[in-house]
Image (cartoon, rainbow, N blue to C red):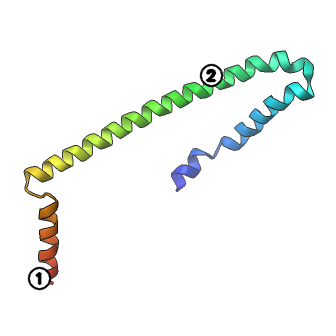
Amino acid sequence: MALVENLFKGWGGMLVGFGAGIAAPTLFPDAGSKVRPVAKTVVKGMLAVADGLKTAVAEATEQVNDLVAEVRAERAENGHGAAGERGRAAGRQAGA
């Protein structure tokens, strides 16, 4: 849960800035032509961050899937498949 909280920790200020950017043209009509390029730059930056995050998540997912496949292959090679695990658990209960 802390990971999710840390992920969204800095979003409050960004949302306030985004809201101010949206309200600025209404409050200051002459500033609209100056705010738009800044807003576009912010959106471009956010898209770049989102693309980078998407790539990082895809790579992490691939690494975890590779690790799981490697462990499953090792378990199958050693004869420790799911049935072997159940058999050992039953043996421990019977011996206890």
CA separation in Å, label 1 and label 2: 64 Å
Taking the view exactly as shown, the residue that stands out farthest to the front is 83
Q: Is residue 23 left or right of residue 52?
A: right
- Label disc, if present, on residue 24 of the rendered structure: none
Please name the residue shown 33% across and 37% down the image: 62
State whether residue 68 is above or below residue 27: below
Residue type, label 2: Lys
Residue 82: x and y in percent read: 17, 60
The amino acid type found where label 1 is placed reads: Gly
Above/below status of 87 relative to 17: below
Quarter of the view holding residue 90: bottom left
Above/below status of 40 relative to 1: above
Callout 2 crowding tier (Cα within 10 Å): few <14, some 14–19, many ≥20: few
Residue 25 vs residue 86: left or right?
Answer: right
Residue at the spot 14% in from the left edge and 49% down from the top edge: 74
> Which image quadrant for residue 14?
top right
x and y percent of residue 9 in the render?
63, 46
Q: Secondary structure at mark 1?
A: helix
The C terminus: image quadrant: bottom left
Q: Are the residues flagged by discs 1 and 2 in contact, CB closer than 8 Å? A: no
**Residue reaching furthest to the bottom:** 96
Q: Few, some or many C-alpha atoms within 10 Å of disc 1 (few <14, some 14-19, many ≥20)?
A: few
Look at 68% across and 25% down and name the residue there.
42
Choose the circle earlier in sequence order: 1 or 2: 2
The x and y percentages for residue 63 are: 31, 39
- Residue found 66% across the figure and 25% down from its top: 43
Report the side of 95 relative to 66 (left or right).
left
* Residue at disc 2, secondary structure: helix
Residue 44 is labelled as 2
Q: Position of residue 46 (x, y in %)?
A: 61, 28
Task: Find residue 95 and name its label.
Answer: 1
